[in-house]
Amino acid sequence: MSPVLDTAAGAAPPRRRRRLRPADRLHRALFHLAGIIVAVLFLAPIAFLVLAAFRPAAEAVSPPLPPWPKAGPSLDSFARLDAFGEGIWHYAGNSLIVAVATGALTILVSVLAGYGFSRYRFPLKGVVFVLILATIMVPFQSILTPLFLVLAKLGLQNSLVGLVLIYVTLQLPFSVFMMRNAFDAIPKEIEEAARIDGVRGLKLLLRVLAPLALPGIVSVGLFAFLNAWNEFLAALVFLTDERNYTLPVMMMVVRQGRFGSIDWGALQAGVTLMMIPCLLLFLALQRFYIRGLTAGAVK
Amino acid sequence: MSAITGQALAARPAVSPRRSRRRRRDLAGLLYVAPALALVLFVLPLGMTVWMSLHNWPLLGLPRWIGLANYKALWNDKAFWRSLGFTAHYTLFATIGLLGTGLALALFAQGTGRVVALYRTAFFLPVVIGFASASLLWAWLANVDSGLFPALFEALGLTSGRVNILATFDPAFWSVTVMVVWKMAGFYMVILMSGLQAIPADYTEAARIDGASALQRFRHITLPLIRRPFALALVLCVSGSMLAFDQFYIILAGGPQNQTVTAVYWIFNTSFVSFRLGYGAALSMVLLVILVALSVVQMWLLRDKEEAR
């Protein structure tokens, strides 16, 4: 297990090398037993919810013991969920528009800014960079009230466009920082070579540098998408017309219930829809997610 | 490049070629950065918060300058101080739970190998699903009629009959806190692990050869060396918990008896339910000052010894 034990085993004859000492084997078994139990505990709530979402209407009201549909899976809960408001796909569409637009705009703005900060010199550059980073210190919850008025003045209140602008702003400090580091890591020689070949300006950025900074771009876009998809408080405050609700706000309507009773089956179906994109994106792009997280953490 | 300088020279022969080139580069740099700046200007509302907090500012109708009256009213606002007190209470337990669990998970799963990587992924999955989803999920799990926990506790014989755990303060508070630990522990695991993995293996080996026990190695090698990521985790955890809203709004709606209204929840109520925007801005300023002070104190407490000199 430890390097010392490994080298000791390496010096031993080959037949004994494979076999661990009984104490080590017990240790390893206990380690994996604990690992499996804790992993199951962490995954169980998600698994319970997804399984329970496929229970038929008759079972949906009872506690999830067991969570899976006893009488075979059914889409009842999803059908009842679809009966809320404009239909669930309308709200899923709102969420998707907001999340994709936030991701795209964040990438666009932070790539340009990161490139500018990494490769150009201009007056007050240091001050401006620190200013952008410093906004991370101001929690958005504390400027919610004036933000509400600013958006109302601009006519962007109760609009998905306004929400996207806010989300992008919240993503920028982290994203600009990430992108500046990504461009800093690209050797200047590559740029010089491209310049000599006559590629410059935006073309240089898009054709030559952006592909090299792709891991950083994916991290930035992933975080922006997931945060916009999951954000709740700003959407709750700024969206007043039910037609514009994103999924989390719409699910509050389901959670509050109708005629004094809550349709838990519909709630399970809705939360399943909210979780699946996050889980799939994370599992597919795990590397970029963790890298973004630790890159933000190191500094 | 030469074509550009050529044009510039033709246009303004008085400026030396080098200077105009640099000016162009300056301009280009500013252009690249400009969109980011335009959006960050959204943060100007910070100044506006201060301005608004000095007014009686209804949603409709004209704001009226009232000086420091909002802050005076706030001083005697029992509900606000109670919400701050509850937020501090929650922050204390959530931080202990999160950093304790996060560190335990990090120590457990720091090894290499495919199976350990799978464990890490499992521990981390709840982090990516969002607070609203997790809170809605927990609202169902803790529900007395069709949720898991009350039925499970009854089946295990822990409670006699099915008990509504969200109806009284302590079980309600703990079920939310457990939810937060479940959801966010993986995040702090990753942050702390970035520190653990930076510890050179020779250090622990040398200590082991010198006969230091596992506990001594942890206390004298691991803990001092993960100081930096630990400070970051602490600051993130405390400020995140002080800003808690989603979970208490969605799971408990501030209940039972408004005992779980957090500071942000109270500001939300003031500004967007009662529409007393000026007063809400004053409350926001107080919360902001507290948050910045907390961060400064934590960074100071956990500063590196060398930097302190």
Image (cartoon, coloured by chain):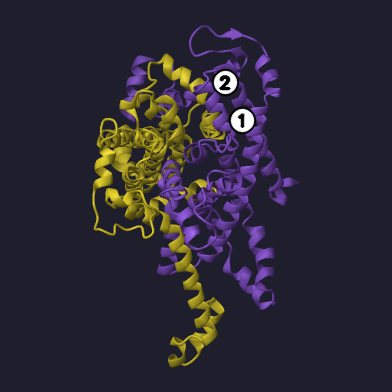
Chain colours: A yellow, B purple
Decide: is B216 above or below B125: below
Q: Please tell me which residue lies in front, A262 or A218.
A: A262
Q: Is residue B307 left or right of residue A297?
A: right
Q: Is residue A6 visible?
A: no
Label 2 CA crowd tier, 10 Å (few <14, some 14–19, many 20+) = many
Q: Is residue B103 left or right of residue B10?
A: right
Q: Residue at x 63, y 38 (%)?
A: B86
Q: Please tell me which residue lies in front, B50 or A238.
A: A238
| Residue most extreme to the front | B161
Q: Residue at x 26, y 35 (%)?
A: A83
Q: Please tell me which residue lies in front, A243 or A73.
A: A73
Q: Position of residue A54 (x, y in %)?
A: 28, 52
Amino acid beneath label 2:
Thr
CB atoms of marks 2 and 1 within 8 Å: yes
Amino acid beneath label 1:
Leu
Per the image, label 1 sits on a secondary structure element best described as helix
Q: Position of residue A266 (x, y in %)?
A: 32, 43
Label 1 CA crowd tier, 10 Å (few <14, some 14–19, many 20+) = some
Q: Residue at x 48, y 28 (%)?
A: A122
Residue holding disc 1: B288
Chain letter for the residue marked with disc 2 in the picture: B
Q: Residue at x 41, y 58 (%)?
A: A43
Residue holding disc 2: B49
Q: Please tell me which residue lies in front, A47 or A148.
A: A47
Q: Is residue A72 left or right of residue A242?
A: left
Q: Earlier in the sequence, mark 2 or mark 1?
A: 2
Q: Position of residue A287 (x, y in %)?
A: 39, 54
